[in-house]
Image: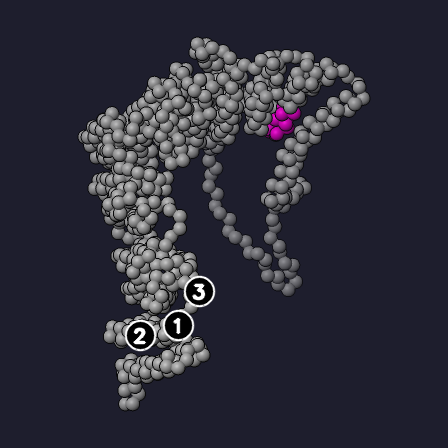
Amino acid sequence: MMQTNLLAPLIFGALMLILGPLGFFLALSARERLSIAERRIASLEARLRAVSAPARATTAAPSPAPTPAPSPAPARARATPGQKSVEPTTEPKPRVPSTPRVEKPAAGAAGLEAALGADWSVWIGGVALALGALLLVRYSIEQGWFGPAARCVLGLALGAALIAAGEWLRRREMASRNPTQTPAVLSAAGAVAGFGAIYAAHGLYGFIGPTLAFAALGALGVATKLAAALHGPWLAGLGLVGAGAAPLLVASAAPDPWPVVLYLAIVQAAAFGLARMRNWDWLAEAAAAGGALWALLLAAAPDVLHAALVQTLIGAAAAALYSASRRQSTPLDRVATILPGGLAGVAALIVASATPIGLDAATTATLCAILVCVALAGAFRACSAALLPIVGAAAVAISFVWPGNPDAPARTLGPILLHAPHAPEHFLVVAIFSAAIVVGLATRRLATDGLLYPQATAYAFAAAATPLAVAATLYLRLADGPSSLSFALVAAAIGAGFVGLAHFFRAAGSNATATLAQGVFATGALAALALALVFFLDRGMLTVALALSATAAAFVSARLDIPALRAPTAALGLLVLARLLLEPRIVGPTLGTTPIFNWLLLGYGAPALAFAAAARLLRRPGKADAPTSIAEALATLFAALLVYFEIRHALNGGDIFARGTGLVELGLLATTSLLFTLALVEIDPRRRSPIFDIGALLFGAAACFFSVGVATIADPLLSCRPLEGGADLLLGYAAPAAAAALLMRRAHGLRPIWFTRAAGALSVALLFLYASLETRRWFNGAELCAQRGAGEMEVWAYSAAWLALGVLLLVYGLVRGFAGARFASALFIVAATLKIFLYDLAGLEGLWRAFSFIGLGFVLIGVGLAYQKLVFRTATRSTLR
């Protein structure tokens, strides 16, 4: 491998070699512009002559004297007897010789005919020509006509002849102004023949060594791309593929990556130059993709990290120059963003695959140069504004994947183990320099006028988010513990810088860009302050700090009327959600066992309040947009997670990941879900946010799920689990039954009828289970297992309990005028009636069987009288009248 100190001369040599193709393209472009100008001048002269000729003829010819108009002659004189009719005499018209008419084909037929006859036939003929040449070579080998050397020479001669024929035919067609695809097909076939002959001379017969074969294949590939400037895009694609694959076709006993890097620099320069001259974006994208693949291949080889990074640097520089020179009028150019941005991402991948041995000063310099090239492309042209956020993301990614020292202390971030970085001084240089270059260039662009709204948003987001994200990454990699005063001071300094920038843009004027920058930097200052609190206090404060930053962004967006800050508010909310999904316990195993007053209360309660406030600030009249809906959804979700996890934490000894759930826990979870459903039903019913509608359905489904668990796996009768306290059945069954009944009552008229009926059915089912199990506990204590059987008094007590409950529900329904309660009463009474007639008649004996029927009779008579006197009284009276 070449020493590191030879890196600068190699890069200088590569740049010198790039100048040749660039000069060719510049000269070719100048010649093309000159020919276009000549044709336009000739066209203008012809138009001028055509306009001036009638004017000269008009001035030279004498004006004819006016002649009286002839009187119209009668069409035919009437003939008198003895006279002949006189026909008007007319001058005969001269006869024009007729020409044969040629019938033109229809438009569709003409297009198909042109495609088949003029285009496809040429390309199919070129493929047939190439296949025929290959078959001829194969036949000559089988017959032994020529030796290996003669075959290679004939292949090269055939390729040269085809290329020469293509060029000769192109010039003739240019002279006749009737170009076709035939010259390009002949040149492509000649290029294929040349590639095959050179590869055969090296790989099959060994006539030439790897150096000469490599140079010959590369030269032919570059020459093919140069010829594509004259023949068209197909030849350019062929040349790019051939030139890019040439190093793979050459085998060497002692491979050296640096000649490959220099060769690829020439290939990429030719491809980007041709793409720029012809406006072939596909060729630039293909060249960038090929260079990125070669960089990854080099990175996979041992001890060639610097070669891979230099290859990425050359590709990034070429892509940046191409992006900066594009004539693009759209606010954000996709091609100019993807090309350099993708190569910045490739640099991060190369660093992730690097070994600590190669991370030295040369690595640092090359990485910084790559990021600078991409950042300058984003700052030079406004249509590439999205490159600066990409550079910021690449800087954060490089800092995150920088190889660590396995002997140094590690920090866990969920499933990720982060070691202290190898070569921390170089690590700091790359991180700090990349953040500084992004902030500087983005701020410089924001200070200029004429930026469109998406461009200004991209620059402002890059300037504010990059230093904060880099500071957080450095804290994760370098801080000695969860609390670091030095990093807190760094975050405070970043916040102070943001305050200064906000004041600067406030004084700059009242244009849209200045207002946007002022709001973004003000929000960034608040976020930096929150980050400083995280660094100084504890890691659990990160969630709180991010949530407060989202509220601050919403406040600035509403106060200064900056719509661009609405999306970052939602993005911060999603970031908080990702943080909580990564570690739901907020502070990991150190959560503790104290009920309610623990880190869950702050870690979930503060984000819930923060995003509720953000949703209120972002709310606009009319239909809610995506940021408002996301803030509302996150506020609801964090509030629900707070209650859910607090319940699990309190009932499982502080372990929210404990296996299994009990009756009380499932009952409380079902009650919580029903209460959240009720809250979402009643919150601002006139506005009817779609988030609240969807949330109510989801919480209702969760309540049903938990209720099924209460009735099956946690049922003490079926599972034979003893009750642990006197309130188990009350919390497991009665509480969710009451919540479902309240939901049915309050949702009437606000939700569809099936929604209220489902809530009522759930309430009746849970209440039935509660009454039955409470009756069984009265006779059996904490052991409710069904295998213990039941006595006659217990069997009778079930009927009495159901009837009593039915009567109470009927009284409530009559007093409150609630038909749902009366319907539930009817269900309990029907269930008791069926039990008495179907079971008690045969299962009970003596006095208990008599009491069952007597009690049922009294209840049914009383129910009938109540309905006749109270429910249907009005209807009866009106009928009698």
**Residue sitting at x 75%, y 24%:** 138
First along the sequence among labels 2 and 3:
3
| Foreground of the two, 65 or 331 | 331
Horizontal and vertical percent position of residue 506 = 20, 32
Visible residue check, residue 673: no
Look at the numbered discs 2 and 3 and tell me whether their residues touch, using CB distance below 8 Å.
Answer: no
**Residue sitting at x 33%, y 38%:** 588
Looking at the rendered structure, the kind of residue marked 2 is Ala
Visible residue check, residue 845: yes
Magenta extent? 176-189
Q: How is the image coloured?
A: one colour
Q: Is residue 545 magenta?
A: no
**Residue sitting at x 79%, y 18%:** 145
Q: CA distance from mark 1 to mark 3?
A: 13 Å
Q: CA distance from mark 2 to mark 3?
A: 27 Å
Horizontal and vertical percent position of residue 743 = 30, 63
What secondary structure is marked by label 3? helix
Point out the image quarter for the C terminus: bottom left
Q: Is residue 181 magenta?
A: yes
First along the sequence among labels 2 and 1:
1
As drawn, the label of residue 791 is 1
Q: Is residue 28 above or below residue 768?
A: above
| Foreground of the two, 216 or 58 | 216
As drawn, the label of residue 787 is 3
What secondary structure is marked by label 1? loop
Q: Is residue 212 above or below residue 386?
A: above
Kindly identify which residue carries mark 2: 804
Horizontal and vertical percent position of residue 81 = 64, 64
